[in-house]
Amino acid sequence: MEKILEVKDLCKTYIVNKRQNNVLRNVDFTVEEGEMVAVMGPSGSGKSTLLYTVSGMDRMTAGTVKFCGSDISELKDDELAKLRLDDMGFIFQQMYMLKNLTVLDNVILPACKSEKRREKRSETAQRGRDLLRKLGIQDIADNDINEVSGGQLQRACICRSMINSPKMIFADEPTGALNRSSSEEVMEELAKLNEDGTTIMLVTHDAKVAAKCTRVLFIVDGNIKGEYNIDTDSSIRERERSLNNWLMEMGW
Amino acid sequence: MRTNKKGDTMYLNILKKDLKRKKTMNVIVLLFVILSAMFAASSVNNIIAVSTGIDYFYDKAGMSDYFIITLDSSNKGMEELLNSVPSVTGFRRERSIFADRTNFTRNGERLADYNRAMFLMPAENAELNYFDKNNEVIKAVEPGKAYISGKVPFVSGIAEGDRFKVKLGEIEREFEYAGYVKDAFLGSEFMGNSRFILNKTDYEAIAADERAKMSEGSIYYIDSSDIRATENALSDVGGVIFSGSKDTMRLTYVMSMIVAALLLIVSVCLILAAFVVLKFTIGFTLEEEFREIGVMKAIGIKNSSIRGLYLVKYLGISIVGALIGFILSLPFGDMLLVSVSETMVLGTENSVFVALICCAAVVGIIILFCRSSTRRIKKMSPIDAVRNGQTGERFRKKSIMHLGKSRLGAVPFLALNDIISSPRQYGTITAVFAILTMLVMILANTANTLNSDKLLFLLGTTKSDLYITLTNDAMEAMGDPYTTDAKIKDTLGRLEKTLADNGIPGKTHVERMYNVPMTFGDQRSSVVFQICPQTRADDYVYEKGVAPVYADEIALAQPVAEQFGAKIGDTVTLTVNGEDRKCIITALFQSFGQLGKIGRLHENFDTNGLSLSNVYSFQIDFDDDPDEAEIERRKEKIKEIYDTDDVFNAAEFVNDCTGAADTIAAVKNMVLIITLIIVVLIAVLMERSFISREKAETALMKAVGFGSGAVIAHHTARFAIVALISSVIAAALCIPLTKLAIDPIMGIMGAVNGVGYEIRPLEIFGIYPLIILAITILAAFITSLYTKTIKSSDTADIE
């Protein structure tokens, strides 16, 4: 397996009211292609900051982050935007979408902006519909975003993150705003994507969600305190139990 | 609203927090309140000042009911006549020496190339109140100094303290320019005469010269109990070069009134623009607060208390804004009125009070806006409010365009889709931009029309290649009524010979004007008639009837016909040298001449013995039908030959006669500048509020891979599209609206049936829309650079 993400000595510091707040302190980890990594930790530990910093959405204070071998700290804003557009997908806790567009248009928007594929607009729209069908929400394609449920919207957000066939998807608490059944549906879809070969890194508070991943990074006070490889051959119940035990050991 | 101390503190804390947290939107609302208050206060003041302007000025100046200017300096005969007319209740007389531009020099050059009669007058003999630039009555003038009214100070560019010379006959005296004088009688744009007010000693020294004495005449200010009777009684007075009633004189301020009327339209548009944008801004700042409203409702705070909170907030903002707007309205109002107030004394004594009332009204209106906008709070359940005002029920699809079916790129699609998805929001901005653009276009059409040959027919002249003013020849012809024809013929002959000698042969003619007493029924009054023996009566344009064919047929301008109650087919009596001549009215026409009170005689009408009251410029029609460029070249050549600047092509001649194009063009330029300022303000403030409102979407766009450039292009493109649509609307409506708005103004000047307008496509449909479009794009672009501060990671911080 090739390394898709290499993080070394990553630091992120905020200055708030002239006080220095070191959110990430010399974080080191790697993610290999095809992995599904969960980042867990208490509130304020720096999980989301880590996700945004390694995905180039936020600038790091120090350290290096290599995505597919290239150091993103050396990229300009526009180059980072292009990287996010073509090679990364994002899923947020709140199902952010542009309110003036239909669900399908929101899904295909990154593809229409990207120059990665030379295809007709109708072909892009068809790919969008195929993705929606794959996630079982083809019926809401032409709906406005306020006409659909939160679970449907989050699945549409997954479709949007997939539309440019990214090398890696970053998800910040993708099930955080969903009820239990919607949450399970969304996680199933993410797991399927991962099975199909898409690398995923997600932030979660939920051990049930993390148990569907292949590895868990536990972060406390801006440092990775521990790392847990999940036995993907065991049953989901067994995974959850062993993960919970490990989390308890880590002080969760 | 029943609250305890704890409750008051809580509200105060919410308010404080709101003002701090929503700083941008609050500042935007404050700026629009300032704009609204400023426009409302200055515009209402201007409306009052202008609508009462002429009466106020006349009252202050002490204008009489009727006026006569005669070439007779001996008072006796006229005094006896006036004393014998029962309807004359009193009269005053001013001595004046009549001069022209050749009598005034500065540094060896002509003081002003301005071709109207000029008057010298001693201050001590003033029978009207003349005002300086500070609206103080000029009671005396120091020896060696002179005040000047009318256009000369503007044309010459003379500044206070500059020196100039007056030479009449053998006497030459040097004067220091003491300042501009506002002259109610002669200072209007249409009268166009400049009056030089001197010290009596200086005046007498000039008047001592024999030639100056010959040029001395009188201006009579006559008070009358019955204007018509006075007019009838004085219709046979000889040597009159001008007569008119106060009502007629009012019309000479038509240009100032036109400017004022245009300013009024501008002001109303500006108020509307500011209020519309304000209502919209308040509406959507409240939308931003729905979540807080929902939380307050959820914890049990009453609707009235919640509404009260926002009403207090907007009351505070509007009071602060209205106060600042009030202060700014004072200089802004002065700036709007400057072109009117520099020649008239305007009543602005109550302007501060009026401005305060207007600002209070703005506060009241804002609170009403706010009340109507917060009415939704009552209807919404707490959860509706938390969902940002969405009730969950939607009957109209928001997305009309579909990216999947569009050929547009992602950025232009998003821009266009935003506009189509929010028609009220962008429709408001489009309407405001379109109104402002139309205003500029209408003014430009008016100025261009007044500076084109389209209005030639209203001056009672035919179209010629060139027009030349030969004042000396004209003055000479006006001397003996029995030699007038011969002298004019001689001048025309000499002009033709000069042209032929210089290799540019052509035919010449000139319009002459005679004051002829006319009687119809019991109506008798002196009417100015135009005639040109070298043209045919049917060369001119008539509104009704047919051109006079025989010598005993005449045409009348519509206002004259109305004054006499005469119509086509009626027979009137013209008195020529005591002889009554019956003439049939065959046609009615429109004219700017004498403010529409003019007639036309057939070319064969015998004018021998009639006193010539005026001649127009001498007209030249070249034999070889040259093109425009050649005409321009010949114009310059003739200027050299005659050593004069008074050679015009047809368009310039119209401009010179109406004297209005430059004024309207100046107003248009001012309106263009105001329009650009408003457009920039709206673009900047609205774009800033869009950025604030769409922070989440912008962050999302960046997160999914839109670069800063794409986001800026998206924001800028929306305003570009809005400006483009507004330009198209303005272009489509500007021609009918020009006719609708300006025809009544042309009617005041005498063109009662409207005119055809000069539309210059490049300027109207190209230059102005492009300027407004470019400024809008620039303003939106610069403001949208602020989106750079929104990062993709801000998606994590959005509520």
Image: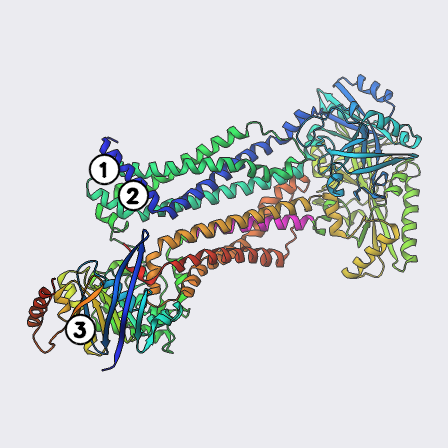
In the image, taking residue B734 as reference, residue B584 lies left or right, namely right
- Residue B541 visible somewhere in the drawing: no
Dots 3, 2 in contact, CB < 8 A: no
Q: Name the residue under label 1.
A: B302
Inspect the image, locate mark 2, and give the three-letter code of the amino acid beneath it. Answer: Arg
**CB under 8 Å between callouts 1 and 3?**
no
Quarter occupied by residue A196:
bottom left
| Residue B112 image point, x, y percent | 79, 42
Q: Specify start and end residues of the magenta stretch as a single range.
A: B426-450
Element marked by disc 1: loop
Circle 2 sits in a helix, a strand or a loop, which is it? helix
The crowd level at tag 3 (other Cα within 10 Å; few <14, some 14-19, many 20+) is some
The span from disc 1 to disc 3 (Cα, nearest Å) is 48 Å
Question: Which label was assigned to residue B376?
Answer: 2
Looking at the image, residue A90 sits to the left or right of residue B443; the answer is: left
Label located before the other in sequence (2 or 1): 1
Position of the N terminus of chain B by quadrant? top left
Q: Are marks 3 and 2 on the same chain?
A: no
Kindly indicate whether the residue at mark 1 contacts the one at mark 2 (C-beta within 8 angstroms).
no
Disc number at residue A191? 3
Chain letter of mark 1 equals B
- Nearer the observer: mark 1 or 3; the answer is 3
Residue B136 rendering spot, x and y as whole percentages:
67, 27
